[in-house]
Amino acid sequence: MPTLVSVNVGMPKDVEWNGRIVHTGIWKSAVSGPRMVRRLNVDGDGQGDPYGHGGEQRAVFVYQLESIEYWQAYFGHDSYEFGQFGENFTVTGLPDDEVCLGDRYRIGEAEFEVTQPRVTCFRVSMRLNEPELPSLLVSHGRPGFYFRVLEEGHVRSGDEIVRTRRGPHEMTVAEVDALLYTPNRTTEALESAVDIPALSPGWRQSFRDLLSPAEKHAGPGWTGFRPLTVAKLVRESATITSVYLDAPGETLPAARPGQYLTVRLPGADGTPLVRSYSLSTIEGYRISVKRDGAASTYVHDVLKAGDILDVAAPRGDFVLEPGSGPVVLLSAGVGVTPVLAMLHQLATEEPAREVWWIQTARNTADQAFELEVRGLLAKLPKSHAHFFHTRPESGADGRRVTGRTLKELALPADATAYVCGPQAFMDDVREALVALGCADVHTELFGALAAINPGVRGAGTVAPHQPDGPPGTGPAVSFARSGLTVRWRDDGKTLLELAEACAVPTRWACRSGVCHTCDTPLLAGRTTYDPAPLELPPAGRILVCCARPVTDVVLDQ
């Protein structure tokens, strides 16, 4: 008979790890006597990262004594403590290859339902000091699983575990875990998983995405960098210059409206400057560059027609999606460029759609593309145009886009909004649009993407910089979004660890090649893996948490 061997709880605390502080609740210990289990938790327990753990779908984490003994033998440890894998319930007799998603169990006074396997993350490796453990939990079919609490009540160690219902499709925890994290999945299996009512919403959406791969995962038009010719340069405003690029005698692959090009420019010290600029039209390749830093100064002051630039293929997920409903294009400053490309698309191919154009600039001198915008809007019978100047030349009070001004515009609640500009601007506008009932809001950030460092305190507070210590002598690693190029030091680290040493914003969760949170476009170069990921990312992308450069590389990071 399956049995509850131990009940384990622990409140979140700050733990030092790799020179950083992680807020985590994975330190749990056994308790004696009855313990109340509620909808969101076991009494006395807590989670440090509520986005990845906890909540109604992940109220109780379950791990098996048999798996604990398996890892004890695998790693050669003398003993493990109950709760060391972060489990609330240490059980016997509920193996991952027999328990099914949607199974229900009675334990003591409470009843539970299996909702999903363990979320692969670095905390379990941090707790047990085994860096590859998140990957091993999946590859060895021993992830453990979460319970949802159907009926609250007291439980205690020694309680028998009685299954009260079998889950639909009888898909085991190990099967569902492998379905997400390993290759060779089938459409039939994905459809069965999506059809399990008990499956947590996050996992269901992941399987839906695998059933309908988005166009954004399509490969780029070419690999690495290729030479393109500067056809002409056009001054668009006091601070923005457009660069027209082409390949004489050749038709370049079409870009989706909203995508960007990454270009390689000569640096003063011989180190290339790698930067990404949005395409501002769908008619050929035109990037529009604001004067701001060494690379853009080169574009404004040195670059001329006839010059050759190394350019990577169009990329980016901030793209105009197909549809028939109203569209809001909202920008500030040079953030106008990707939404201008979208406006070109709408005026050319979707003139029946209702379009709201909302553009913010400091004044008329800084307002780029006004004549072009008005010409495009004239082709859209259902268009609405609003221009805001924050510092008018007249000295009058400036106007800004705020929640109040957006409310006064009476935007349709069913609109799809595309917002580009400084981070604070986008955050405020997104919040205002959602408050007005517009739930479908897409944003694009110039520069590095926001970090995903679960539980790490104080991440992302320092500007990207060269790493401490002597310079490396290996391949050049360029972080395109962060505008930084670093020579690789062959010190056993990964590209993720190099990015962290340079304060480049990073995205990760498992740090062992399982979860694909660190999936990053590789614009140029070759890499190798150690350890090898359980499933390779799509072509043109790498998992930086376990990748190392073989040649000079350029990352969209």
Image (cartoon, rainbow, N blue to C red):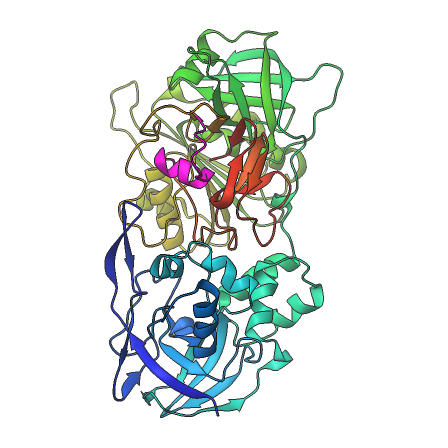
* Camera sees residue 487: yes
Taking the magenta stretch, the answer to whether it contains residue 110 is no
Q: State the residue at coordinates (28%, 69%).
A: 46
**How far across and how far down the image is residue 37, in percent?**
32, 83
Horizontal side of 217 relative to 298 (left or right) equals: right
* Residue nearer the viewer, 341 or 57: 57
* Camera sees residue 319: no
Taking the magenta stretch, the answer to whether it contains residue 497 is yes
The residue stretch that appears in magenta: 487-504
Q: Quadrant of residue 159?
A: bottom left
**How far across and how far down the image is residue 111, in percent?**
42, 88
Q: State the residue at coordinates (36%, 61%).
A: 128
Say how many tags the image has: 0
Q: Quadrant of residue 484?
A: top left
Horizontal side of 237 relative to 533 (left or right) equals: left
* Residue nearer the viewer, 457 or 312: 457
Q: Quadrant of residue 449?
A: top left
Q: Give the vertical position of 236 relative to 137 (above or below).
A: above
